[in-house]
Image (cartoon, rainbow, N blue to C red):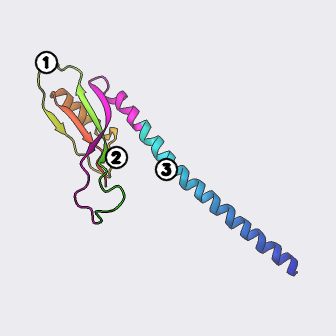
Amino acid sequence: MLFLMTGFSQDQQNDAAQIKKLETKLENMTHRFDRLEKMNEDLLWYQKVGDVAFIDKVYITGPPNPHIKNPTAMGVDNPVKFWNYVFIPKNIDPSKKYPLLVFPHGGVHGDFTTYYQHIIREMMAQGYIVIAPEYRG
């Protein structure tokens, strides 16, 4: 009887270890799925507004954060970096100047999706160049 209980306990430990391993793998895959979803969403911009706008996604750097609590921390002088979507109307005359609109989207950072495509389409029709920063939280 003791032998059976020891074997059962061993099986529970093995199962718990396997479950922990699977949970870790799933957690790692979740990040990859989020990245894949974002990449698909980026491609959808070309399908949704590519007929009226030149589209680009650019990485912009800004000055380092001036309000660092620890001025000797590693990376304190590193610039702030963030992605920005740029939309330029296809029917513009490059010899003229056009207004620039900074479009601060709602939601969480890194969440500029094609949900906003109707707004971008309207801005392109009105002749605005639009930049939509993926602000950091």
Q: Which mark is residue 31?
A: 3
Residues at discs 1 and 3 in contact (Cβ within 8 Å): no
Find numbered disc 3 in the image and state the secondary structure of the residue it sits on.
helix
Q: Residue visible at 29% across and 53% down?
A: 77
Quadrant of the rendered structure where residue 127 is?
top left
What residue is pinned by disc 1? 95
Quadrant the C terminus occupies: bottom left
The amino acid pointed to by label 2 is Asp
Q: Earlier in the sequence, mark 2 or mark 3?
A: 3
Does residue 49 show up magenta in the picture?
A: yes
Find numbered disc 1 in the image and state the secondary structure of the residue it sits on.
loop
- Residue, far front: 72
Residues at discs 2 and 1 in contact (Cβ within 8 Å): no
- Residue, far bottom: 2
x, y (%) of residue 32?
51, 46
Find numbered disc 2 in the image and state the secondary structure of the residue it sits on.
loop
In the image, the segment drawn in magenta is 41-69
What residue is pinned by disc 2? 111
The amino acid pointed to by label 1 is Ser
Q: Which mark is residue 65?
A: none
Near mark 1 (Cα within 10 A), the count class, few <14, some 14-19 or many ≥20, is few
x, y (%) of residue 53?
27, 26
Q: Residue visible at 37% across and 28% down?
A: 47
Q: Which residue is nearer to you in this view: 127 or 60?
A: 60
x, y (%) of residue 51?
30, 22
Residues at discs 2 and 3 in contact (Cβ within 8 Å): no
Q: Residue visible at 86% across and 81% down?
A: 2
Quadrant of the rendered structure where residue 7 is?
bottom right
Near mark 2 (Cα within 10 A), the count class, few <14, some 14-19 or many ≥20, is some
Q: CA distance from mark 2 to mark 3?
A: 15 Å
Judge depth for marks 2 and 1 and give the one in front.
1
